[in-house]
Image (tube, rainbow, N blue to C red):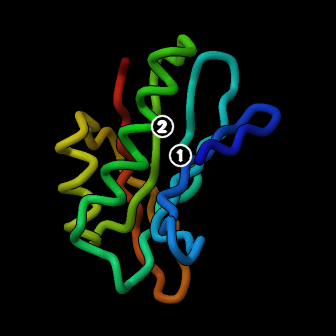
């Protein structure tokens, strides 16, 4: 499923039988740059490739729509998400100190150039 809004795009993996959203990713676009706002997978469906699938769709959309780069922030401790983004071609380019709350934690800034 594709959800397109003004200056933004989102993709969701949906269970065909129940209609439940299993994973989703969202992005806003300014000029030719994308910024990932959310990526999440339902806890019961993690480690099944769903986050990668929705991110693949975001990146495919970007390539088809002349988006030159995509950025995101991720908790420094979220090793599995960092590994996912690294595998998709994102690189850590910096940190945002104390970016997250509850608990307070730095964010890694990652960018993929298309």
Check the image and name the residue furthest to the front.
Answer: 17
Measure the alpha-carbon separation of dots 1 and 2. 9 Å
Numbered circle sitting on residue 5? none
Horizontal side of 61 relative to 45 (left or right) equals: right
Residue tagged 1: 36
Q: Nearer the viewer, residue 96 or 34?
A: 34
Q: Residue at x 57, y 24 (%)?
A: 33
* Vertical position of residue 91 compared to residue 75: above or below: above
Picture quadrant of residue 30: top right
Number of numbered discs overlaid on the protein picture: 2
* Vertical position of residue 40 compared to residue 64: above or below: below
Horizontal side of 17 relative to 109 (left or right) equals: right
Horizontal side of 20 relative to 9 (left or right) equals: left
* Whole-percent x, y for residue 87 in the image: 17, 43
Tell me which label, 1 or 2, sits earlier in the chain: 1
- Label 1 with label 2: CB-CB less than 8 Å: yes
Badge 1: residue crowd in 10 Å (few <14, some 14–19, many ≥20):
many
Numbered circle sitting on residue 58? 2
Q: Residue at x 51, y 27 (%)?
A: 61
């Amino acid at each position: 499923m594709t959800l397109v809004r003004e200056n933004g795009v989102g993709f969701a993996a949906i269970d065909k039988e129940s209609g439940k959203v299993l994973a989703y990713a969202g992005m806003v676009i300014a000029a030719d740059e994308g910024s990932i706002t959310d990526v999440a997978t339902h806890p019961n469906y993690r480690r099944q490739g769903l986050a990668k699938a929705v991110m693949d769709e975001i990146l495919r959309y970007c390539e088809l729509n002349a988006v030159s780069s995509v950025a995101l922030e991720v908790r420094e401790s979220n090793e599995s998400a960092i590994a996912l983004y690294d595998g998709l071609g994102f690189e850590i380019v910096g940190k945002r100190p104390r970016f997250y709350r509850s608990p307070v934690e730095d964010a890694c800034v990652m960018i993929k150039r298309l």
